[in-house]
Amino acid sequence: MGFEKLADLREQLRAQAQQAAPAQPKAAGQAKKRESGKQRESAKKQEPARKREPVDPTVEAIWRLQKQFPLAFPKNPAPKVPLKEGILADAAQHLEALSMTEEQLKQAIAEWCKGSRYWTCLAEDAPRVDLQGQPVGKVTAQQAAYARRQASRRPGGKPRPSKKPAAAQPSAAPTPAAQPSETQPAASQTAETP
């Protein structure tokens, strides 16, 4: 779930909570109304404090990129677009306008370019875009193949489970003849992945 979706969900939940709050009956005393007014004022003062919670600098840098260059860094649910090769050098020219360091920019673009949402946009002959969203190149077949391999990887680098269920093997200890057949597929799997 993207950051934008989480923010929208939080706003929806707040609106639902406000609607679900029971209305005070008219018979309630003036003192209760004054207290609730004071509570609302104190809640308003506390609300900005909640918005100022520490945010990961990389996430904040991505927000700034999305605000400054919305066509190159679209917000969710819009699909990501393949970025121009060398986009970091182009974006580095705008460090002052983005109010971030070169290291923050580098981390933000690296974070943006990893993950299945970005890897799926790298289809062969898809146009690569610059910061203004103008096409400046195309994704090559080699780059698309690399993206497909990256997208098929499991998070955390864990190997995929074997297709044969473990319950199909007898519960007794494996025989020496069965052990080589089990190790051969594992050896071929490690040879395939770089």
Image: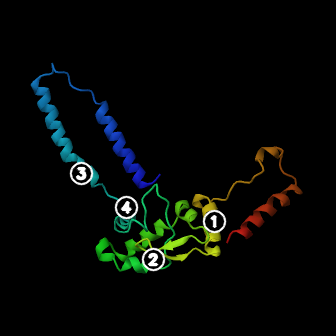
Ranked by sequence position, the earlier of labels 2 and 4 is 4
Compared with 185, 142 (above or below) is: below
Q: Secondary structure at mark 3?
A: helix
Would residue 107 appear left or right of 95 to someone viewing this image? right
**On the image, numbered disc 2 is attached to which residue?**
87
Q: Secondary structure at mark 4?
A: loop
Question: 112 and 70: which one is in front?
Answer: 70
Give x and y (percent) for residue 158: 63, 59
**On the image, numbered disc 1 is attached to which residue?**
148
Ranked by sequence position, the earlier of labels 3 and 1 is 3
Q: Which mark is residue 65?
A: none
Count neighbours of disc 1 (C-alpha within 10 A) and say few if under 14, some if 14 to 19, many if 20 or more: some
Q: Which mark is residue 49?
A: 3
Q: CA distance from mark 2 to mark 4?
A: 22 Å
For the point 29% across and 73% down, the residue is: 97
The color scheme shown is: rainbow
For the point 72% across and 67% down, the residue is: 190
Q: Secondary structure at mark 2?
A: helix
Compared with 50, 25 (above or below) is: above
**Amino acid under disc 4:** Asp
- Quarter of the figure with residue 53: bottom left
Q: CA distance from mark 3 to mark 4?
A: 17 Å
- Quarter of the figure with residue 32: top left
Compared with 92, 6 (above or below) is: above
